Image (cartoon, grey):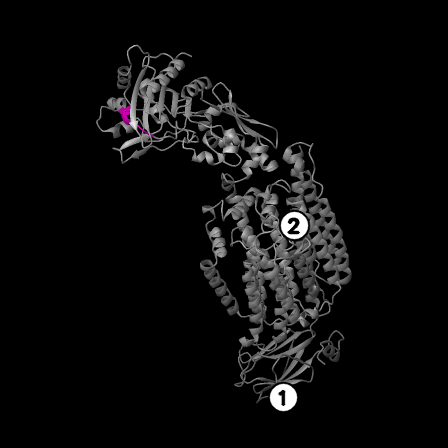
Amino acid sequence: MNRVTQGSLLKLAAAFLFLQALIITLAPAVRARTWDVDYRLSHWVAFFVWGLFVLRAHQSIVRQLPDADPYLFPMTSFLSGWGLLTVWRLDPAFGTRQAVWLIVSLLVFLFGLGLPSTLDFLRKYKYVLLSGGLLLTAFTLIFGTNPIGYGPRLWLGCCGLYFQPSEPLKLLLVAYLAAYLSDRIPIRLNAIPLLYPTILLSGVAILLLLFQRDLGTASIFIALYTIIIYLATGRRRTVVISLLILVFMGVAGYYLVDIIRARIDSWANPWTDPEGSSYQIIQSILAIAHGGLDGRGPGLGSPALVPVAISDFIYAAIAEETGLTGTVGLIAIFSILLIRGLRAAIFAPDIFRRLLAAGVTAYLGVQALLIISGNLRLLPLTGVTLPFISYGGSSLLTSFVALLILLHISNHVDEEPAPLPRPQPYYALGAFLCAGLFVAALANGWWSIVRGPDLLTRPDNPRRIIEDRYVPRGELLDRSNTVINGTQGTTGSYSRVYEYPALASVTGYNHPIYGQGGLEASLDEYLRGTRGNPAAAIWWNHLLYGMSPDGLDIRLSIDLNLQQRADALMEGQRGAVVLLNAQSGEIFVLSSHPTFDPADLNELGMEINKDPDKPLINRTAQGLYPLGTVIRPFAQAVTQTELQSAYEAFGLNRAPLIRMPVAEPVTDTNNGQDLHVSPLQVALAAAAFSNHGDIPAPRIATAVNTPNDGWVVLPALGAPRKALPAGTADETAQSLIVDGQNYWSHVGEAESDESPITWFIGGTPPNWQATPLVVVVLLEEDNVQLAEEIGSELLTAAMNP
Amino acid sequence: MIATLVLLLRLLLAIALYAFLGWTLWNLLREFKQQSDKLATQKKPGITLSIKPDQGSESKRQFSQPEILIGRDTKCDVSITDEALSAHHARLTYHHGQWWLEDLDSTNGTFLNREKLTTAAVVITGDHFKCGNTVFGIQVEDSDGLSLRDAFELGGLS
């Protein structure tokens, strides 16, 4: 009966792992979206190692422990196989080592099956075993190393093999406590002195771990000690005292120990320092969010982006690739394992084995809870392993020894369970572990379903950069569909090309390291394809690839001919030029100088931020300059002495609504309440003179090329507004026309903190029959003549196409 | 194309995971049913107590439940108005194939065959014990063909 149950469960586990291995093999083809790829094959070694040894262990269990619990081994085999494939998929080198450790663990396991089920030797040699464990752990203080070369030195190692003595020490402590307490249980445990030896030895163990700064293991020790004393004595007091000690230690540690403070701070407020101390936890949450409900599929996520994904963050890796569906299953498997472990405890034939089984179960449960909660930001991070799953030889071996103990204890048929005068603590332990896992499942759902979609749009989500290489980004085109910023390459190697770098301050950049700027940032949703595509296509692509559909091209109102002309005129200058359609608000020219070439970002790096020329600033919309005397015609038009009413009438005190990064105007209180505005704002205000008093709503992105409906107009965000009565506007424009010119113009000067400022504004006269135009030239120097030259040449060129 | 195929495999993967869990739960349920059936059919040997209060006549009562609580409290299975008895005085339980007597921290103690009881002890036919001023005689029904002597030895208490 047991044999059949265990066998059929193992077959299902093998089916799961086979499918997982198959998907990992095919994953590169899905990523590249072609059959012609190098398929992953090496992890099949892991699958066969798992299959061979699990089959062998199954046969031995059936033969040697025929009455053992038939669920324990399938659960743990399932978990260890899942872990092994995940580790291998993350890093084949570590996967190979983990496979070797699985073989070692199962060999030890097979040997252990032959031991007597009474486990008397553990009882007899409890002091020898615990002291040995403590001694080995103490050695790490002197000879300790870390396999990766840095970090806490918790390992003893030689010749490429590393062992962490604190892992088996956990089991040894459990065995010691169970043996000691079961010998004394018939005597009433009222007397605290009876507990002295356990307090002493556990205290030594905990102090050792605190010295090593292995805080996670130290907290597990405190938890295990509490749980076993509670199980043995049934006194709730022990739990309360322990909790108080833990809280006290936490508070004291927070103020006294840097590493604890760092851990707790990064846990409590992760979003304040996403690049620094909270990097790990944020990456973990992003991975879980990316998994969503269905997961990206084994081999198809990017869990390697989370630091130490193979051990501390393997839960996040599994959550990303199998989603909530997978992790709920994983949590359920853990729950069944724990419940069966506690069942073995309840039915144990003597008190020693009962305490031992419950303690071993508590060890597996508490450790799993700690690290899963750490990954989900339910608890501060503690660097412990997820039993059976995480990479780590000592952990895997210890977990299998724990399983061995549970199997032995569950293997009895003739003996009746020992009397259980106080069942309450056992229920409480089971309820606590299951409730903890349930809360973890809920938290997982919170991150992956509720908060996930928002989190993934965070600019520090590194998956967006990967997506940029696999999904072609939409292109930015000028008004006659000439490419300004384009995409080149093929799936897996797409990159951005900047055909007209002089516009870079405006169109911005999309860079894997330095992020996004300009229109690339403000139009990102369309360019990335998460907006404008049919919802079904977005959903389907996310389901298949975990990515968005192809990005959509966007047509800008920019006229590259005029733009080139403006840039040629501005060559070598510092300033900005704006030319726009005074009626429709379409912007033809946005010239900001000095500028930069996004292609050089790789070499320039963040040095560009320190450039005194500020090339990253789009001077046309993000540069703020004092208005100075350029305000005069506006003030005259509203016939008010108070400048504030002119600002109000022409909307100069508000940032324009446009799909482009713009700066909010600021009032310079030091300098006579002068308003600092962007050239774009001045151009819009000036449009009133050429457009009979109306200020148009500005537009830069005019249309988006959707797959279903072709080019779809992107309407202006704002609405046109009336600044002046048509008559007043026309009169003012007429008064600004210089004799012999066919356009109105005005020159203003101002002083900014850094340099003198020259403004030129000009536009088509009120009676102009063709497209009404406005131009604004801004120079960061005192040069009226140059400003007039540039303005008039550009305006004339635009008026006579 | 390949992505759709892999999507199908991913679906199968999720099904395999939940099939594993479902099959586990199904087996657990079956095991639970088997155990309940087994317990339901399991025979428990009854016990007969001859109760002799300090004053008054001896009475005999037969019990079939596995736990008998003795005390002054009216909720006890054997409730006796005896001033020397505690509210919950002693308990007889059946497990490990025999009947056990234990004292429940009573004021005046429980005496099995005149000796004061400190831990739970096995009782067999012919034993008598005293709670307060009441004396109880024990007669265990012989069941399952298992003699009391055998049960005694199996319990490892000889």
Q: Where in the figure is residue A197, as x and y percent of width and height?
A: 58, 73
Magenta stretch bounds = A625-631
Q: Where in the figure is residue B25, as x and y percent of width and height?
A: 66, 54
Q: Amino acid at mark 2?
A: Gly
User: Looking at the picture, does residue A631 appear above or below residue A140?
Assistant: above
Residue A592 visible within the image: yes
Determine if the magenta segment contains residue A486. no
Circle 2 crowding by C-alpha within 10 Å: few under 14, some 14–19, many from 20: many
Do callouts 1 and 2 point to residues on the same chain? no
The residue that label 2 is drawn on is A83
The residue that label 1 is drawn on is B114
Q: Secondary structure at mark 2?
A: helix
Mark 2 belongs to chain = A
Q: Is residue A784 left or right of residue A220?
A: left
Q: Is residue A700 left or right of residue A407?
A: left
Q: Where in the figure is residue A744, as x and y percent of width and height?
A: 31, 16
Q: Name the quarter where the N terminus of chain A is drawn.
A: bottom right
User: Looking at the picture, does residue B73 appear above or below residue A535?
Assistant: below
Q: Where in the figure is residue A445, as x and y percent of width and height?
A: 54, 47
User: Residue furthest toward the left?
Assistant: A641
In this orientation, which residue lies closer to the viewer: A2 or A601? Answer: A601
Circle 1 crowding by C-alpha within 10 Å: few under 14, some 14–19, many from 20: few
Determine if the magenta segment contains residue A626. yes
Residue A713 visible within the image: no
Q: Is residue A491 left or right of residue A527?
A: right
Q: How many marks?
A: 2
Q: Secondary structure at mark 1?
A: loop
